[in-house]
Amino acid sequence: MLPCRLLLLSLTLLALTACAPSPHDAEPTDDIELWKEATLRFQPLPDTAPNPENPVTEAKVALGKKLYSDAGLSRNNTVSCNSCHNLATFGVDNEPTSAGVGGARGERNSPTVLNAAFHRTQFWDGRAKDVEEQAGMPILNPVEMGIPTEEFLVNRLAAVDGYPALFADAFPEDDEPLTYHNITRALGAFERTLITPSRFDQYLRGDHSALTSQELSGLQTFIDIRCATCHNGVNVGAFTFQKFGLNENYWEHTGSDTIDEGRARVTGDESDRFFFKVAALRNVEKTGPYFHDGSVETLDEAIRVMVRIQLGLDLTDEEIANVVAFLKSLTGKVPAEAMRPTE
């Protein structure tokens, strides 16, 4: 009888092992409600980011890509768009604030350009409506790229072999294709191709094996503690403005001497004081340091600070690790064509 019992036990254990889920398998009966909740709060990245006022064409994208990496868009030929929004490092420079043409640094952290075309507004204070308008502002900023006037840059590019023809190809309907407006339109068209879908998008589209059990636990915590109240939608953020420091004074917490008024500097409205655009969390594991001032170096510390000063909560180390794991599932790949060297 003993050998039979051992045989039966072995077969039972073998069957249980064969049926055990892999680390990437979601439990359909346990996780279906979480998936339903996630699909209500988040949306997968679309394949394109169109702008009816600036249709994306191959010629515009090719021109925009060339302009994006051209340091000639700065006064002393030292700074390009890619200097602060480096595509090789997920559209950022991984610095708290970025150095401009004279070595001076800007006041705010340079956010990633990846998926920026899906943001409701641009910059931390929302002063630009889209990536086209945004693209023209750093070029003329005296600290950032330092070009003195729009005409100065147009004349400079007109004297560079190849540019007049590229502008003519990109804007064939224009009598004068090489204009400052078209510089920003070309840059915007290129930036609209910088879309980075991730495993989280696979999950939202119904692939329940796309996330690990730890990532699912982190997603559950992210929703349960109300992070998704602000960090939601296609970009897991970047749609609303929120006061930074709802439960604690952030500047007292850090001991910073520099207090940023946030969106109030744009609107002049006291009610916008300390309000900033909610950060987009796609590729967030790669885009530190964090917050508008780049004051927090690591992702886990950024989570700890946010849940304390925004939500009045403290998370366990395990909960923090789970949320970090979930946020890493938002990491995609920079489109290969954008990474190829320009001719």
Image: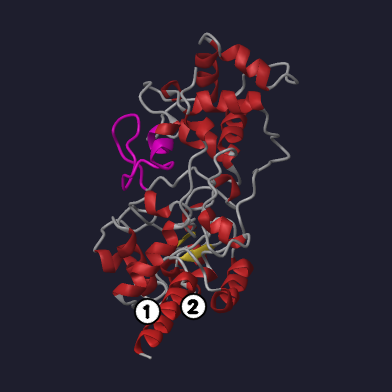
Q: Amino acid at mark 1?
A: Leu
Q: Main secondary structure of the magenta part?
A: loop
Residue marked by disc 2: 224
Where does residue 108 sit, x and y in percent of width and height?
A: 38, 48
Image-based side of 306 in relation to 140, left or right: left
Identify which residue is drawn at 55% across, 20% down: 151
State the residue at coordinates (43%, 83%). Answer: 8
Q: Which residues are magenta?
A: 83-107
Q: Nearer the viewer, residue 82 or 283?
A: 283
Q: Is residue 59 left or right of residue 268?
A: right
The secondary element bearing badge 2 is classed as helix
The amino acid type found where label 2 is placed reads Asp
Determine whether, in the image, residue 13 is placed left or right of residue 169: left
Q: Residues within 10 Å of mark 2 (few under 14, many from 20)?
A: few
x then y, percent, for residue 333: 48, 43
Q: Is residue 90 magenta?
A: yes
Dot 1, how many residues are within 10 Å of its Cα: few (below 14), some (14-19), or many (20+)? few
**Quadrant showing the N terminus:** bottom left
Residue, disc 1: 313
Q: Position of residue 7 (x, y in %)?
A: 40, 81
**Image height of 236 relative to 132, above or below:** below
Q: Is residue 324 magenta?
A: no
Up/down of 39 relative to 225, above or below: above
Residue 19 horizontal/vertical position (percent): 49, 72
